[in-house]
Amino acid sequence: MSGALLRVENLSKHFVMRGGLFRRSASVLPAVENVSFELHSGRTFGLVGESGCGKSTLGRAILRLHEPTSGRVLLDGTDITALNARQLKRRRKDMQIIFQDPYASLSPRRTIGQILREPLDLHRIGPTSAREARVVELLERVGLGRDARARYPHEFSGGQRQRIGIARALAVEPRLIIADEAVSALDVSVQSQVLNLLSDLQKEFGVAFVFISHDLAVVQHVSHQVGVMYLGELVEVAPVERIYARPAHPYTQALLDAVPAPDPTRRTGRVAVRGDVPSPLSPPSGCPFHTRCPQVMPVCRERVPRSMILNDPQSDSQAVHRVRCHLHDPEIIKT
């Protein structure tokens, strides 16, 4: 696992939900449970799953926008979860986020120039006299002119606002960017422009991305590795080519089968999942997916599947194909 820019080790995030009379009763919502993966510089880790599976919570927990309940996040060898407030502030410039809603994440009372200059001032990047020039450089880099500095967010289209959000994330020259549904609210043509921009920026600056999306077609286009989440857990992680060609988990197979095909006569032969996503407040026993799995076995209802490696990565951690499913457990198959 050496050489990774980002290492997430058994990361969990639980929320305490209070209710009842005087909010005295409490229950625990396990939004993210024991998630582990790693990411190298200049690479993209795609994170996919249905709405409510914990993707965005995981992204925010990595950045400590949500304080993790347990586990570790190592950025270039430094344990982010162990830093105090002052130390964390100094490391903020190394890890940034692009939010899903570009309008809600931009202050309507500030001009674009003020929005882009704020992180430069906060982290004291460059001499004061050069920061305005840096703002212009950022705007031109994302395809907007210098005239945008004096305008407000409401004066821009959704795609343009997302470009401003990207420029703000790049302002402090981060090494890691969490892109949380960064193109989901955009038209298809604008999505393509923004995705190409992110790809160009990654090639130019070597930025690593955690790209969160429910759109598997988009994830396939931008990712090097893909992680599939279900009820807060990573059920499958593999290189993008392998996971799209040979998905191992029934949930991954179902997600891929749901992607619209250009040829409507094409049939995969896979069986669609049934039922609704269980409540994370009372997850099923055994495998969390067994209530919807078309290939469920009796053991799935009783025993939590262990994590297994399906291939020989030859010491390349980025080539590992890992899955949590009894269908691939040699001990279960033998019995």
Image (spheres, rainbow, N blue to C red):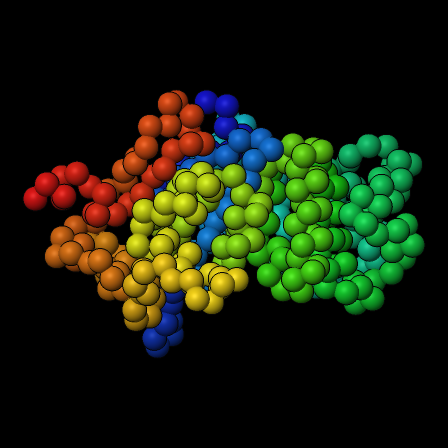
- Looking at the image, which residue is at 28% across and 40% down? 307
- Looking at the image, which residue is at 22% across and 58% down? 295
Return the x and y of residue 250 as percentages of the image width and height: 30, 54
Q: Quadrant of residue 15?
A: bottom left
**Nearer to us in this view, 211 or 68:** 211
Return the x and y of residue 185 as percentages of the image width and height: 63, 64
Is residue 169 at all visible to an observer of this figure? no
130 vs 107: above or below: above
Q: Is residue 26 left or right of residue 86?
A: left
Is residue 256 at all visible to an observer of this figure? yes
| Outermost left residue | 335
Q: Quadrant of residue 121?
A: top right
Q: Quadrant of residue 52?
A: bottom left
Which quadrant is the C terminus positioned in? top left
Which quadrant is the N terminus positioned in? top left
- Looking at the image, which residue is at 37% across and 53% down? 252
- Looking at the image, which residue is at 87% across and 60% down? 151
Return the x and y of residue 111 as percentages of the image width and height: 84, 58
**Nearer to us in this view, 185 or 133:** 185
| Outermost bottom residue | 21
Return the x and y of residue 53 as percentages of the image width and height: 41, 58
